[in-house]
Amino acid sequence: MFLSLKQLALCRFIVAQLLFTSVLFSCGKIGDPIPTDIVFPQVITDLTARAENNTVALKWSMKGRSDRATRIRILRNERDTKVDCPGCFGEYEQLFDGPLSDARFRRVDKESFHYVDGEVRSGKSYNYLILACNDLNYCSEKSNMAETSIQDKD
């Protein structure tokens, strides 16, 4: 059975349309779908770290956005202060991930928070980052980096 010229032209047209449509609608970023109505917590921009009595006190605020964040994730890395390599920190490790209602957080006021890292060692420098997360575990971008050092005991 042979196709007429009209039928052959129609088949070519349909195939061309299918190819064009698949190329036209298949382009774009491929990634995990995120519902458009999700409101991410805003990034923390004022994280500070201060060495106090062989601990590190972290302080930050979430001005006007603490209602969006229900969890905090604290990341930390360390390096030996005796190594002459500023900025040569390793990978960040998760120090804490928990609700803002956790007893380890101290709420300074409605928008400011305080956390004490007691797992530090003398002669080390520490970098910290914080992410604010919501109930669905969608997190903000990483905060500003805060750095401090624990001095060797004399």
Image (cartoon, helix red, strand yellow):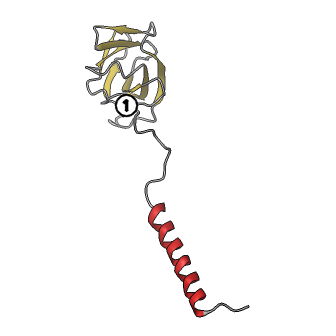
Q: Residue 124: x, y in percent? A: 39, 23
Residue 53 seen anywhere in this rendered image of the structure: no
Name the residue at the right extreme.
1
Q: Residue at x 41, y 28 (%)?
A: 80
Report whether residue 71 is seen.
Answer: yes
- For the residue pair 77 and 142, the one nearer the viewer reads as 142
Query: Where's the N terminus, which quadrant?
Result: bottom right
Quarter-wise, where is residue 14 in the image?
bottom right
Answer left or right for 82 relative to 4.
left
29 or 2: nearer the viewer: 2
Q: Is residue 137 above or below residue 36?
A: above
Give the labeled residue for mark 1: 39
Using the image as rendered, state which of residue 139 and residue 136 is in the foreground: 136
Element carrying mark 1 = loop
Residue 87: x, y in percent?
Answer: 34, 37
Residue 22 vs residue 65: left or right?
A: right
